Amino acid sequence: MVTENTAKRSVLLIVTGSIAATKVPELIRLLKDKAMDVTAVLTEAGGYFISPLTLASLTGKRVYSELFSIDEETEMGHIQLSRKSDLIVVAPATANTIAKMAQGISDDLASTILLATDKPVLVVPAMNVRMWEHPATQRNVQTLRKDGVVFVGPSKGALACGEEGHGRMVEPSEIVDEIQRFYDFKKLGRPLQGKKALVTSGPTVEAIDPVRYIANRSSGKQGHAIAAALKALGADVTLVSGPTALPDPVGVKMVKVESAREMLDACYKALPVDMAVCAAAVSDWRSSNLSEQKIKKPAKKSMKPEDMLTFTFMENPDILECLGKHGDKRPQLVVGFAAETENVVKNAKAKMQRKGCDWILANDVSGGSVFGSEDTEIHYITVDGEEHWPLMSKRDVAFTLASRMSDYFSIDPKLRKNNVTKLLL
Ligand code: C5P
């Protein structure tokens, strides 16, 4: 991770009414450990779970809670509060606060600040699972995501109300990681402004008949995170993705596809681009005898080989290879992934050459743990050598890769290619 030697990083922390407010002291302590300046705003409901005195003692500052207080307004008005910090963090954020934010309601100090701000907003939900899953809350979350609000969590587990499911506020350390990531991106600025990027993500789905298909377990987390990271660094991003359960990253051009061939078509349509990252888990095979009708079960049960249902498969196009070996429209930088179960680095290097890509990010999937998980360990391989990135979140992998890519484009084109790694290390 990039570390920052900053004189002043200031976070406005809005605490709303949830039992998870009891984790706020730890959050403030962790932020202070990173030399961040924290100002707290407490809603009326939040005040039932944590006292203003606790927040004032931990932040070392006055706590704000009243919209119509002569005292508070003269010292620091709600407009000033909404603009003074680098970032606003709402933690914990209740369903009520999220609903007010989505609707633009400003009936107390916290919601007025959130409406008046021109700063990035990070929301950390905490609520009962039914409240989180309610279509109204999900609608509000979607609206806010489209507005550019970043959500962290909620996580799944036992809830204070005794039920189980999504609704737990994520741990303070995860909130701090997300805040740190915000500052890492902020420090880099928008070095990829004016550059075009293509990213593939998710699985592909290959039909067998009109209702059945073969697919794989890719969640799309890595590819989506890379698209979001490149976008945050200023690139104009097209994300071509197979079906996933993830929200579309804000501000990217999203192209949703199913099969490998559709994915390849969409990639070709996106060319020319300056850089391409193939993070999709493309199915290597598709049915060679796609049935136009739903395949029926046999009328009578039989174990005879001649009565078995047999499929034959033919090879799909290799999208990474098609881009890596593209004649006139080859992106300047083509990056692939390699999921290997043995000889990770050796196999990944061979794959890099075979597919004509510049860099490859290899991970060891022998334990089967990478698909769908949050964390991964990477071997970053270029023509010049190899570097090990220790276990980190897929979002940190995305940030690290995106910052390497922006380093690459900052180098004089004549010096790029084979020399790029030497210059970066
Ligand atoms: O050969 P393998 O599937 O291990 O290669 C992985 C890399 O190749 C990934 O970057 C993946 O996105 C890409 N790939 C592709 N099209 C395929 C198969 C893999 O783009 N048909």
Image (tube, rainbow, N blue to C red):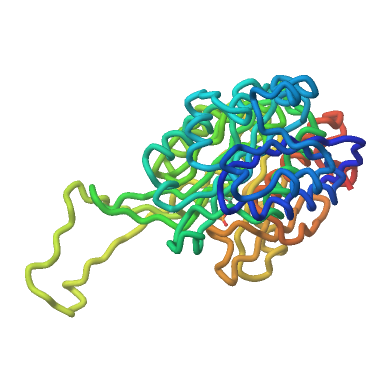
* Number of numbered labels in the structure image: 0
Relative placement, left or right, of 263 versus 396 is left
Q: Nearer the viewer, residue 258 or 143?
A: 143
Q: Quadrant of residue 170?
A: bottom right
Q: What residue occupies the far front of the structure in this picture?
A: 70
On the question of residue 227 being in view, the answer is no
Query: x, y percentage for residue 399?
Result: 72, 43
> What residue is drawn where x is 76% and y is 48%?
28
> What residue is drawn where x is 79% and y is 40%?
38
**Placement of 334 over or under 219, stated as above or below:** above
Q: Quadrant of residue 277?
A: top right
Q: Nearer the viewer, residue 377 or 160?
A: 160
Query: x, y percentage for residue 201?
Result: 53, 44
On the question of residue 188 being in view, the answer is yes
> What residue is drawn where x is 79% and y is 52%?
29
Q: What residue occupies the far left of the structure in this picture?
A: 299
Query: x, y percentage for residue 119?
Result: 69, 26
> What residue is drawn where x is 60% and y is 39%?
123
Q: Nearer the viewer, residue 16 or 251?
A: 16
Q: What residue occupies the far bottom of the structure in this picture?
A: 303
**Placement of 313 over or under 4, stated as above or below:** below
Query: x, y percentage for residue 356?
Result: 66, 45
